[in-house]
Image (cartoon, grey):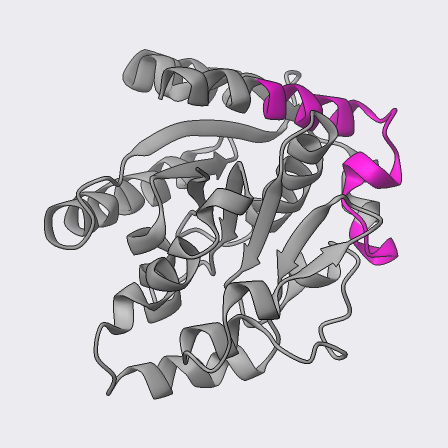
Amino acid sequence: MAKIFCIANQKGGVGKTTTTVNLAAGLAKVGQRVLMVDLDPQGNATMGSGVDKRQMALSVYDVLLESASVAEAAVYSEKCGYHVLGANRELAGAEVELVEVERREKRLKTALAEVLDSYDFVLIDCPPSLSMLTLNGLCAAHGVIVPMQCEYFALEGLTDLVNTIKQVHANLNKDLAIIGLLRVMFDPRITLQQQVSDQLKAHFGDKVFDTVIPRNVRLAEAPSYGLPGVIFDPSARGSQAFVAFASEMVARIGKF
C-alpha cells in the first residue's frame, strides 16, 4: 500500500520540483515502486522526468475531471525508473472547472485510491500557491515534505504552510501531518544558513531530516536535459545526497 506525500511550500523557488523528481529517482534507485504526480500547470516535474508534456495523450487534468483513471494517464519514464502522472497548461483550466463540481478537493484522493497497491510511494509536486490543485494534493496525502532554504524569509513561509496544514488537517484530511523538513541548496560556509539550520533543529527536532542537500550546479543543469540530477550525474554531491535522502525516507516510513 503506497504512502502518499506532497512536496509543498508556499514560498516559490525553494526547489520543490527538484526535490520531487530527485527523490522519485532516488527511491526508484533503492528499489521502490514510485508514482510522481505533477500538480503544477507549468509541467516542470513532467519535463524533468523525461516526459514531453506537449506529447501526452492524457494528463492529471483528465484524472481530476474524471475522464481518465490514473492507470490510463500515467506513463513510465524508462530513463528515470518511475511512473509519471504528468501536467501541462490544460491543468490551469481545471481550477475553474472544478469550482462547480462535487467533492472537488477530493478528486485526486479518489483517483489514487485505485492504484495504491501498485506503488510504494506516490510523490505529489504542488504549485507554490494555495490553490484548488494544492488542496487536492493535501487532501490526498498522508504527509507533507517541506523543502526549504535556510534563510530568514523561508522561516516566514514555513509559518504560513504550517497554518495551512493545520486547517486542512482539521477540516478535510485527518491523516495529514508534516513528515519532515528538508534543508536544500545548503552552503555551510554561510553563517546565516548554519544559524537558521540550528534554529530549525531546535524548534522542530526530529521533524528535520538528517540529510542535507548541498547547493550543486549539476542538480541545476539536469532539468535542461529532461532528467533528474540523480540520473543525469549520479556521482555529483547533490545526486548522492538525494539517494541518501531516499534511503532515509524508506527508513522513516518504516516507523511512520
Whether residue 234 is situated above or below residue 139 in the rendered picture:
above
* Residue 195 placement (x, y as % from top left): 46, 16
- In the picture, measured across the screen, residue 163 lies left or right of residue 48, that is left
Q: Quadrant of the N terminus?
A: top left
- Magenta segment's dominant SS is helix
Tag count: 0
User: What is the x, y in percent for residue 198?
Assistant: 42, 13
Q: Name the residue at 81% across, 50% down.
A: 227
Quadrant in the picture for the C terminus: top left
Tell me residue 163's x, y (percent): 20, 45
Q: Is residue 46 above or below residue 241?
A: below
In this rendered view, identify the residue nearer to me: 63 or 227.
63
Q: Residue 79 in magenta?
A: no
Residue 199 shows in this picture:
no
Please report the residue visible at 23 percent of the width from the left and 50 percent of the height from the top: 164
Residue 194 location (% of width, % of height): 52, 16
Residue 158 in view here: yes
Reply yes or no: does residue 233 show up in magenta.
yes
Quarter-of-image position of residue 158? top left
The residue located at (23%, 39%) in the rendering is 175
The image quarter containing residue 185 is: top right
Q: Return the residue nearer the eye: 91 or 114.
A: 114
User: Based on the displayed image, in which of its 4 quarters is residue 155 positioned?
Assistant: top left
Residue at the image position 27 percent from the left and 73 percent from the top: 104
Left or right relative to 18: residue 163: left
Above or below residue 176? Residue 192 is: above
Q: Where is 197 relative to 101, above or below?
A: above
**Bounds of the magenta segment:** 223-247
